[in-house]
Image (cartoon, rainbow, N blue to C red):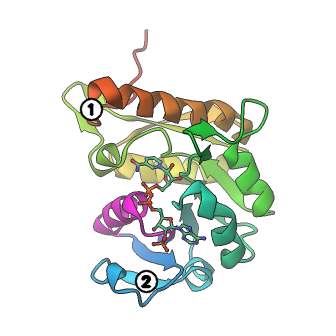
């Protein structure tokens, strides 16, 4: 699959590296493609060029940079857009509460894009390796487009996750606070843990 990673920070490089290792054609879309800090990570282009040929684009920028990055991407209508960001503002508070979400804001900034919220509730160490002695990390997903969710769930399965679809994109209103819970728990648990599901 042709995949664009918007933003080549810690999350972007981790997911991009794993997707490339799984055989996907990954292009990073960044602000300054010839910046030496991107040397050696693989195919790098401007954001618009990176998303132009991509079937799936991952948004992995800081929240402060999300709107600008999506403006730079241009028309994403019909494209699967995975929102891995967390709308965290100064003071570690969510800028969107339980009556709205960053993911829904991303969808408003990208009219027609098939937005799927995923990968935001786990640390990059878990993105790098979702396998634990007692099971696989859950990958929570929400989105209004069932086929887009299934595409992202499929990528998640390839990377070793257990995808769990929560429902429409508005469920991201609860995925994003869950990211803060994960971050809060790192204070006592470190970063090598994830969400798992116990079922009867
Ligand atoms: N770190 C984690 O474990 C983790 C886990 C789950 C979710 N997240 C979320 O994932 C997102 C990225 O986190 P991170 O840890 O990867 O952050 P990071 O290492 O600081 O990377 C952020 C990236 O965003 C890019 N960026 C900022 N503004 C931009 C713009 N206007 N256009 C294009 N690119 C822009 C930066 O590019 P430049 O190099 O050009 O500045 C940088 O590469 C955040 O929303 C975070 O909440 C993080």
Is label 1 in a helix, a strand or a loop? Answer: loop
Of the two numbered discs 1 and 2 in the rendering, the one whose residue sits closer to the viewer:
1
- In this view of the protein, can residue 145 be seen by the observer? no
- In this view of the protein, can residue 48 be seen by the observer? yes
Q: Position of residue 33 (x, y in %)?
A: 46, 86
Q: Position of residue 190 (x, y in %)?
A: 27, 32
Q: Is residue 11 magenta?
A: yes
Residue 179 placement, left or right of 100: left
Residue at mark 2 = 44
Dividing the image into 4 quarters, which one contains the C terminus? top left
Rendered image quadrant of residue 170: top right
C-alpha separation, residue under disc 1 versus residue under disc 2? 32 Å
Q: Is mark 2 within 8 Å of ligand 1?
A: no
Residue at image location 41% in from the left, 40% down from the top: 122
Q: Is residue 144 above or below residue 110?
A: above
Residue 161 placement, left or right of 31: left
- Considering only order in the chain, which callout, 2 or 1, is on the residue closer to the N terminus? 2
Residue at mark 1 = 190
Residue at image location 25% in from the left, 38% down from the top: 131
Q: Is residue 168 magenta?
A: no
Residue 65 placement, left or right of 129: right
Q: Position of residue 59 (x, y in %)?
A: 56, 61
* Residue at the left extreme, as displayed: 133
Mark 1 surroundings within 10 Å by alpha-carbon count, few (fewer than 14), some (14 through 19), many (20 or more): few
Magenta: predominant secondary structure element? helix
Q: Which residues are magenta?
A: 6-23
Q: Is residue 156 above or below residue 193?
A: below
Residue at image location 35% in from the left, 80% down from the top: 38
Mark 2 surroundings within 10 Å by alpha-carbon count, few (fewer than 14), some (14 through 19), many (20 or more): many
Is label 2 in a helix, a strand or a loop? Answer: strand
């Amino acid at each position: 699959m042709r995949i664009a990673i918007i933003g080549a920070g810690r999350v972007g490089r981790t997911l991009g590296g794993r997707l490339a290792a799984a055989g996907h054609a990954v292009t990073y879309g960044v602000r300054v493609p010839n910046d030496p800090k991107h040397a050696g990570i693989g195919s790098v282009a401007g954001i618009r060029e990176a998303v132009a040929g991509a079937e799936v684009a991952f948004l992995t920028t800081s929240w402060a940079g999300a709107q600008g990055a999506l403006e730079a991407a241009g028309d994403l209508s019909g494209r699967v857009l995975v929102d891995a960001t967390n709308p965290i503002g100064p003071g570690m508070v969510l800028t969107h509460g339980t009556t709205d979400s960053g993911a829904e804001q991303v969808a408003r900034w990208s009219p027609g894009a098939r937005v799927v919220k995923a990968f935001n509730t786990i640390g990059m160490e878990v993105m790098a390796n979702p396998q634990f002695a007692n099971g696989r990390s859950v990958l929570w997903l929400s989105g209004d487009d069932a086929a887009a969710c299934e595409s992202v769930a499929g990528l998640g399965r390839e990377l070793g996750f257990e995808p769990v679809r929560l429902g429409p994109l508005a469920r991201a209103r609860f995925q994003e606070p869950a990211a803060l819970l994960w971050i809060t728990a790192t204070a006592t648990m470190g970063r090598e843990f994830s969400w798992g599901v116990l079922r009867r």
